[in-house]
Amino acid sequence: MNIQKSDKYFVISFRYQPYLVDAVKQLPARRWDGANKVWLVPTIYKSDIDDFARKYNFNFSDKTIDTDVDKVYEIPPLPDLAVDLKLATGIVPYHYQKQGIARGLVLKRFINGDKPGLGKTLQAIATVHQANAYPCLVICPSTLKENWRREFKKFIGRDRALILDDSCKRTFPQFHAAGLVDTFITNFESLKKFFVLRLTNTQGQKLTLRHIEFKPEIQIFKSIIIDESHRVKNGSAQSSKFCMGIARDKEMVILLSGTPVINKPKDLLSQLHIMGRLPDFGGYKSFVDRYCAGANQASNLRELNYKLNLTCFFQREKHEVLTELPAKVRQTVVCQISNRKEYSDAEADLIRYLREYKQASDEKIQKSMRGEVMVRINVLRQISARGKVNEVIEFVNDMLEQDEKVILFVNLHEVGNELRKYYPKAVAVTGLDSREERQSAVDRFQADDDVKLIICSIRAAGVGLTLTASSNVAFVEFPWTYADCEQCEDRAHRIGQKDSVTAYYFLGRNTIDEKIYQIIQTKKDMAATITGSTEQVQEDMVELVADLFNQK
């Protein structure tokens, strides 16, 4: 707990304690400096500071220090894009996205720190494509591999991205040599499998880059995209070392993270190393001495922010570009289910029954069978929901690390209970809760900054509630109708919401999820508000799903 004096202010720093925050707020003309994580009080209030220091046992130095709180660092605006983008027909980025692309083309090795929902993926793909920096390697969380493949196809207009797996472990460079693939996608955990020949450090010896012998295949890449780059903030971790080696001397290195700094400025060191940007800050020791000093291991933060923006970083908040954003954005997250064998057996059973259903000649027999078809369809959806939990947890962890609040919709109590066990600090709104318990959960989510996650039952929380503390709505499972999907999304998208809402739909890859979501989005008129009955919607779905499965 320290108080230091600059030219204009007393600079108060301490580890967070609610009673100290309340005490500081009683000081005259106090203000919070978010960039430097300190409180500032004008020097004319010295007697108040003296009393405060004595009462709360602060270390007080009356010697004037050199600090950046008195300096003005004006960050220049991002440039406008001066060239036409070579994207697929119909893909027109927003103005702020074009500015991000323009800045990226200039910087080449940089962090795009835009907040979730602002389209970092599009900007990264467009930057690489515009620079023709192929072959490109995308390193991302395992939950996002399929999403990256689809986004490349969508934004570029050609299907030339390959997800690395065991089937192409040794042959993937040949796909590029044959002109079939120019983008390769893998996850952090697989870097060693695909790109490392051997590690030469002995047992107990600290791993360094000198101990990593990389496969020659890493030389084919001209550009590297690292999604959720805060995952490699620990420079001593294997995945961070692998990224450093793979990215070395590459023409373009793009890091994507809404929160590249999770705790301290030291979080940047590994990411700067990966980009080859540490020399811009005087090297490792100079960076640590200048920006990681003091009790909080954080110093001269305004200056650091300024230098980052000049050399290798930019970031926009949702509220800054809200006029350009639609009120609501939907995004699918295709994930591998963990219980594929169970799912495949249930799917085969459904297909056999659907054949019997379709072959039934008597309309009454078909009608009686329709209920059993519906049951089996729901069984498939439930199996898929259980299989998605691991990847949902990975997604939520990333959002929470970025200090984002999340609304998570589920249907199965089993799934909700598993998530609640994993996130004991989360609040929940379920059909088993009383009205008072539900309202208490909503109030805590809305008012308490420490409550980041609310787990909601689709039936219990799909209408009536206001959850505008978050602009991120995620569906582990989703309703049968477009109207019901909108109702759930609109718990966040309503009066009081200051940001554009992003709705994430988790779809099990090669599961009934993809079929149902496709039907819901294309048959928007199949809504309970039109048919008058959700049961009727489900019965209509039987025919549509049966037709899709009969195409197998």
Image (cartoon, rainbow, N blue to C red):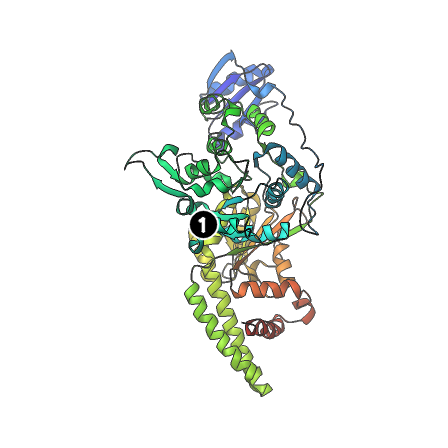
- Dot 1: few (<14), some (14–19), or many (≥20) neighbours within 10 Å? some
Image location of residue 382, percent across then percent down: 48, 65
Is the residue 411 above or below the residue 226 in the image? below
The residue singled out by tag 1 in the image is: 423
User: Dividing the picture into quarters, in which one does residue 115 lie?
Assistant: top right
Judged from this view, the residue extending furthest toward the top is: 63
Judged from this view, the residue extending furthest toward the bottom is: 362
**Residue 144 vs residue 34, the one in the foreground:** 144
The kind of residue on which mark 1 rests is: Tyr
Whether residue 451 is visible to the viewer of this picture, yes or no, is no
**Residue 237 vs residue 48, the one in the foreground:** 237
Residue drawn at the location 62% of the way across and 66% of the way down = 519
Image location of residue 460, percent across then percent down: 56, 60
Q: Is residue 496 left or right of residue 411?
A: right
Q: Which quarter shows the N terminus? A: top left
**Residue 304 vs residue 483, the one in the foreground:** 304
Circle count: 1
Residue drawn at the location 46% of the way across and 56% of the way down = 389
Image location of residue 49, percent across then percent down: 53, 18
Image location of residue 280, percent across then percent down: 53, 25
Residue drawn at the location 50% of the way across and 78% of the way down = 353
Judged from this view, the residue extending furthest toward the left is: 203
Is the residue 509 above or below the residue 316 in the image? below
User: Dividing the picture into quarters, in which one does residue 323 lie?
Assistant: top right
Whether residue 212 is visible to the viewer of this picture, yes or no, is yes
SS under mark 1: loop
